[in-house]
Image (tube, rainbow, N blue to C red):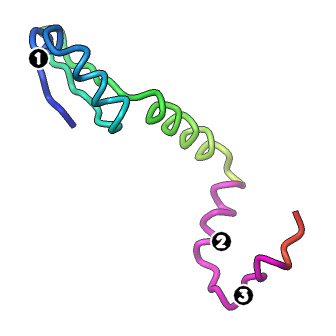
C-alpha cells in the first residue's frame, strides 16, 4: 500500500492512479478530516464479490466442506457432469 497525504496525491494523481490500476496497489490518502483508500476497480469488484459469496451461508459451508475433503474422496475431473 502506498501512503500519501492529500497534497502529494494532488501532485501525483495520474501516477498513483496508473499504479493502482496496473499493479493493484492501493493508495492510502491522509487528510485533516481522516483517511481514504483508493482501490483499482478489479480489487473493488473482488471485495464486493467476496462479501456477496460470504453472505450466502450454504455456499460458505460447501466451500469449507470441499476444502476439508481429501483428494482420494473427490471425483476425477473427467467424470464431473456440469
- Residue labelled with disc 1: 5
Q: Main secondary structure of the magenta part?
A: helix
| Vertical placement of residue 59 versus 52, above or below | below
Q: Kindly indicate whether the residue at mark 3 contacts the one at mark 2 (C-beta within 8 angstroms).
A: no
| Vertical placement of residue 67 versus 13, above or below | below
| Vertical placement of residue 42 versus 67, above or below | above
In the picture provided, is 6 more to the left or to the right than 74? Answer: left
Tag nearer the camera, 1 or 2? 1
- Residue labelled with disc 2: 66
The image position of residue 28, as x and y in percent, is 21, 26
The image position of residue 7, as x and y in percent, is 10, 9
Q: Which residues are magenta?
A: 59-78
> Residue 70 colored magenta?
yes
**Residue under the image location 51 percent in, 39 percent down:** 46
> Residue 69 colored magenta?
yes
Q: Secondary structure at mark 2?
A: helix
Q: Secondary structure at mark 3?
A: helix
- In the image, 36 versus 56, the foreground residue is 36
Amino acid at each position: 500500500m502506498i501512503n500519501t497525504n492529500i497534497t502529494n496525491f494532488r501532485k501525483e494523481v495520474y501516477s498513483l492512479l496508473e499504479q493502482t490500476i496496473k499493479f493493484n496497489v492501493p493508495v492510502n490518502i491522509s487528510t485533516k478530516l481522516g483517511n481514504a483508500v483508493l482501490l483499482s476497480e478489479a480489487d473493488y469488484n473482488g471485495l464486493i464479490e467476496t462479501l456477496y459469496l460470504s453472505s450466502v451461508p450454504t455456499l460458505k459451508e460447501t466451500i469449507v466442506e470441499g476444502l476439508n475433503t481429501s483428494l482420494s474422496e473427490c471425483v476425477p475431473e473427467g467424470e464431473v457432469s456440469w
